[in-house]
Amino acid sequence: MSLESQKELDDFFRSMRQACNSRDIKSYRSHFWTDKRFLHFDAAGRTDEGWGAYEEATDQDFRYLDTIRMDLRDLKYQVFEDRFAVVGAEYSMTQVDPEGREVTHDGRVSFTVVRMREDWKIVAQHFSSRATNGAV
């Protein structure tokens, strides 16, 4: 992996988090492959097959929730030929509804990222909740 690709991916994920946290669906969308083959696996068990299904659920969250806060930590990159990458990280997602109820989820996330022309795009993502109560 070149240093340039690592910097690009660092900037890419920083920008993606900022778009999510500001609930800017247009900017957030620009980080994803908006194809019917896009896959999203949620820690809560939801599976969205195709960009439209994921965008619809995300847009509803962005419109309904007062606050969304996504944090990604300890990003690890496996980059192949500076064109394809698998990225793993620790995540936490805090959501606050209009009544002020706060819910936080945390765990691991993996992203499959491909360079398309000059831009990186997430083509698949998978969120897994952290085990609780000593579960393995």
Image (spheres, helix red, strand yellow):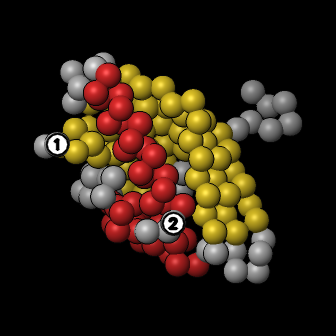
Mark 1 and mark 2 in contact? Answer it, CB < 8 Å: no
Front residue of this view, candidates 14 and 101: 14
Q: Position of residue 62 (x, y in %)?
A: 52, 72
Instruction: Characterize the local packing of mark 1: few (<14), some (14-19) or many (20 or more) Cα atoms within 10 angstroms.
Output: few
Q: Position of residue 134 (x, y in %)?
A: 84, 30
What residue sits 52% from the left and 78% below the top?
A: 63
The correct choice, above or below, for 3 with respect to 71 in the image is: above
The residue lying furthest to the left in this view is 117
- Residue denoted by label 1: 118
| The N terminus sits in image quarter | top left
Quadrant location, the C terminus: top right
Answer above or below: position of 39 versus 29. above
Compared to residue 56, the image places residue 130 above or below, namely above
Say whether residue 42 is visible: yes
* Left or right placement of residue 34 versus residue 94 in this view: left
Type of amino acid under label 1? Glu
Which residue position holds label 2? 22
Q: Residue at x 27, y 42 (%)?
A: 120
Query: From mark 1 to mark 2, how far is it between C-alphas?
Result: 25 Å
